Amino acid sequence: MKLLFKLAAKNLIGAGMRTWLNVIVLSISFIVIIWHKGILDGWNIQARNDMINWETGGGQYRQKNYDPYDPFSLTEAHSNIPASFDSIVSKGEMAAILISQGTIYPAGRIQSILIKGINSDQKILKIPSSQFTGNNEEIPALIGRQMANDNGLKTGDLVTLRWRDVHGTFDATDMKITGIFETNVPTVDLGQVWVPLDRLQKMIGAPGEATIIVKKNIETEVPSTEGWKFKTKEDLLKSITDLIKIKSVGGIVLYIILLSLAMLAIFDTQVLSIFRRQKEIGTYIALGMTRGQVVGLFTIEGALNSVLAGLLAALYGIPFLAFQSKTGISIAGAGKEYGLALADKIFPAYSFGLVATTIILIMITTTIVSYLPSRRIAKMKPTEALRGKLQ
Amino acid sequence: MENTTLISIEGLRKDFPTSGGRFTALNGIDLKIGKAEFTGIVGPSGSGKTTLLNIIGSLDSPSEGRVMVLGQSISDLNVKQAALLRRSKLGFIFQSYNLLPVYTVFENVEFPLLLLKLDDSHRRKMVMDTLDWLGLTDKAKSKPAQLSGGECQRVAVARAMVKRPEIVLADEPTANLDAANSHNILKTMVRLNNEFQTTFIFATHDDKVISYLKRKISLIDGKVLKDEITNN
Ligand SMILES: Nc1ncnc2c1ncn2[C@@H]1O[C@H](COP(=O)(O)OP(=O)(O)OP(=O)(O)O)[C@@H](O)[C@H]1O
Ligand SMILES: [Mg+2]
């Protein structure tokens, strides 16, 4: 076996140009697959983390009438925070959010919004609720960068806010933008205004009530409560997970095309070299190699393409991939329209598993593709191989 | 010269399937070849010389009859046993040298020893001794493409001889060489034959080769016409 590897390596390198062409194509496949999959993995990790940090936490209790796709459900979708949660909330492991519909009038325009009340001392979501500052006159409000840009708002601006209380009566007052936060999660940004929970409760006349209760992202038991349904983190992250899955399928098509190209090149080389090297094959047999050894030799020769490709890929791939994972890949603006968390920059994540599976996958396919044509050698008659007369 | 019999052939017949049925390339061959012989199978083109050599070399098998080589019946060997016989006991020399192009002269000559799994230092010494014998020491690092035809054939002889085989089978070894190189290589083989008692069997119709033979087996249409001891 060791001998065959030695001979195969010699033959392969001796073959020159053709070998290097195959190796280059194959090494590009290595890099593109790892790179592309790394971007998806990086995006997935980033998007999930962003969603968890800004929106879903470790899961949410939702008031039974709450339907995020139906804003009219909001009038009914709030009730008292279960008393059994009090201690958990005060421990800082849960945060209550009250949601109500409203309208703002920035620069004379009208925009309907969701008003979200959240405790100023919560630490579960990244909403900078500690920035609810100021006197009791205006309502302190936080908005996201996108919301601010869309409506031409900046910190310190006063905006008229109109809402309806639980009895359906309209009321209005000024709110003051006390902070603008940067987030990659559009669902906490676009069309949303964050205010202190107690203020919103007072405004709509629903003291002690909430629409959703966000759990901290830690492994704890999930007590069930009358009138509230629990959505797990994974339920809430399903949209992003599904999107990544779709993108992954697109990726697999790309990998298959790339690998097919590389494999075609190797298969072709193998067929050609077995045809052209009949005399050599006959010589090996005359010198006392078994046909099995010769089949092995040619298979290893083909398979070694992937080893050389791996080495070459490491040579230029590691610096490239390392650079990419450090600087990130700019995709500014893309994907906001999905309404999904998407940073301006994706930092590819190359896990050991990703690299290992890619290497193993390519090595196995290369070996199979090298073996298939080599089987012909076992059927050759040595006398005819020596004469080089096989078709 | 008549000592131990290494090869004994009785009633050998070889048929090849052809489009019109079959073609009989060897028909009723009876032969005995002993140790240290320097024998040639001679005859016109198509007389069956290569076919006979291939069967003795276990690269092909008889259709009928018995061919015993070094105590083993060629028809009874499976492919693995045949490979083992060639690997350890037989050396081949071809008309077109059949050197491995990506290997150096040293590596080409070393190849049979690698198959025998000899250890490094042992191998090295055997290769260097053989190269020395054939005057190839200064070509050890050359690739076949850098050698002349005569040098290539000398490398092929070295490769056949390096493991000190019992029998060397040479099919038209001089066909691609000029007269001077032919004589040179033949003299070398005579020398090896004397020195190591290696049995040489040639397939040839070259008069230069014939002039060195100690025994000449004339083949015509797959039959032995004459079997004579020559006075070389
Ligand atoms: N595989 C084969 N299939 C069919 N016929 C074959 C095959 N091998 C050899 N023959 C035929 O057998 C006969 C003997 O062939 P062989 O090669 O032994 O001749 P030879 O004496 O070596 O001739 P040359 O001097 O030209 O090398 C020829 O007529 C050849 O056509
Ligand atoms: Mg012939």
Image (spheres, coloured by chain):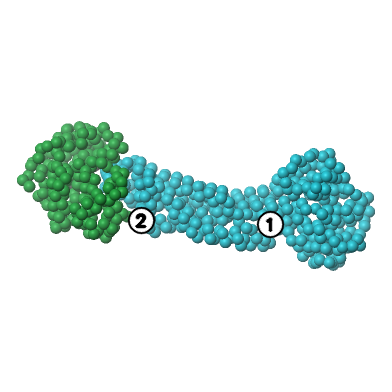
| A320 in relation to B197, above or below | below
Answer yes or no: is residue A119 visible: yes
Residue at (27, 42) in percent of width and height: B87
Residue B178, quarter of the rendered image: bottom left
Name the residue type under label 2.
Gly
| Whole-percent x, y for residue B7 in the image | 17, 37
| Whole-percent x, y for residue A42 in the image | 63, 54
Q: Colour of chain B?
A: green
Residue nearer the viewer, A171 or B206: A171
Label 1 element class: loop
Residue at (69, 52) in percent of width and height: A49
| Whole-percent x, y for residue A125 in the image | 76, 53
Residue occupied by mark 1: A342
Label 2 element class: helix
Residue at (19, 47) in percent of width and height: B170
Residue B63, quarter of the rendered image: top left
Residue occupied by mark 2: A14
Name the residue type under label 1.
Leu
- How many neighbours does mark 1 have within 10 angstroms: few (below 14), some (14-19), or many (20 or more)? many
| A252 in relation to B227, above or below | below
Answer yes or no: is residue B27 visible: no
| A29 in relation to A382, above or below | below
> Which of the chains is cyan?
A
| Whole-percent x, y for residue A309 in the image | 46, 54
- Which chain does tag 2 point to? A
Residue nearer the viewer, B38 or A369: B38
Q: In the figure, is residue B88 to the left or right of A73?
A: left
Residue at (22, 39) in percent of width and height: B55
- How many neighbours does mark 2 have within 10 angstroms: few (below 14), some (14-19), or many (20 or more)? some
